[in-house]
Image (spheres, rainbow, N blue to C red):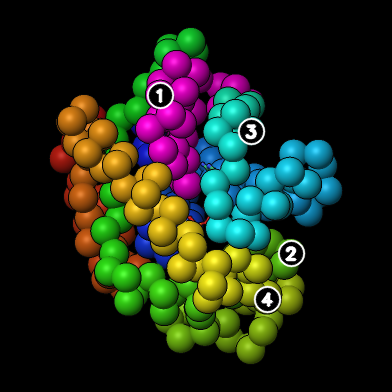
Amino acid sequence: MNIILLGAPGAGKGTQAETLVKDFNLKHISTGDILREEVKKGSPVGLEAKEYMDKGLLVPDEVVIKLVAGAISGFGSRQGFLLDGFPRNENQAKMLEEKLCLVNRSINRVIYLKVSKEVVISRLSGRRICKDCGAVYHLKNIPPKKEGICDKCSGVLYQREDDSEKTVLNRLEVYKKETGGLINYYKDKNLLSEVDGDLAQEGTYALMLKEINNNCE
Ligand code: ADP
Ligand code: ZN
């Protein structure tokens, strides 16, 4: 089973992805995580990507599609995958189809996490991430047991640079302009499941499971 998670920044893609990949034994491919990893390494791709990410802009399509194609070719064809944060515009969606076609694979379902603007802004401003293992927390909704410290690995929690208020507003604009159109794109292909992403984590997850069970064998 191959799934795309679609939704605005702060819709909860990363959080839901974590549970979904465990329950269905999927490979988690998050372009945001891959790009942040490249930035951390200081690779040429990372250096180029950082310029865009800090401004809340999309990294050029050619750069991300290469990373995604690399990730997909890195595991056996019987293993399903979950795309999180990709595709982000129609061009990326088409490039993805071409790449998948070449390896005889396809997308089974696109889950669109629909959230309100207020929820998104509160989630992003309160989001904290573990420097060591990448676990995601929220100051109010998912607080760590000990302030500023990861429950899982005792790593230090930090705020993503692009979660600052100004960049968040930019990311939402970019989402509306570039990514919003993918909702109809996948609706037209009869692949889209719309799910309420404003609920608490478990509530949204239950709705996602229902959609998957109803639409994928
Ligand atoms: P969010 O979805 O919450 O904005 P991500 O971690 O998915 O966070 O992405 C962070 C940043 O990484 C984006 O603002 C963008 O600059 C870059 N990025 C991630 N995925 C893509 C993509 N598919 N295409 C272009 N840029 C991307
Ligand atoms: Zn950690």
Horizontal side of residue 32 vs 133, given as left or right: left
- Circle nearer the N terminus (4, 2): 2
Query: Is the distance from the Cβ of mark 3 to the nearest ligand 1 atom less than 8 Å?
Result: yes
Q: What element carries label 4?
A: strand
Which residue is the site of mark 1?
94
Could you give the CA–CA distance between mark 4 and mark 1, rounded to whole angstroms? 37 Å
Could you give the CA–CA distance between mark 1 and mark 2, rounded to whole angstroms? 34 Å
Name the amino acid type tagged 1.
Lys
**Residue 2 pos. (x, y %):** 39, 32
The magenta region covers 71-99
The numbered disc on residue 132 is 2
Numbered disc in front, either 2 or 3: 3
Q: Nearer the viewer, residue 135 or 123?
A: 123
Q: Nearer the viewer, residue 188 or 57?
A: 57
Name the amino acid type tagged 4.
Leu
The residue located at (58%, 74%) in the rendering is 164
Numbered disc in front, either 4 or 1: 1
Q: Is mark 1 on a helix, strand or loop?
A: helix
Query: Is the distance from the Cβ of mark 2 to the nearest ligand 2 atom less than 8 Å?
Result: yes
Q: In which quarter of the image is the N terminus?
A: top left
The numbered disc on residue 63 is 3
The residue located at (41%, 59%) in the rendering is 173
Which residue is the site of mark 4?
157
Name the amino acid type tagged 3.
Val
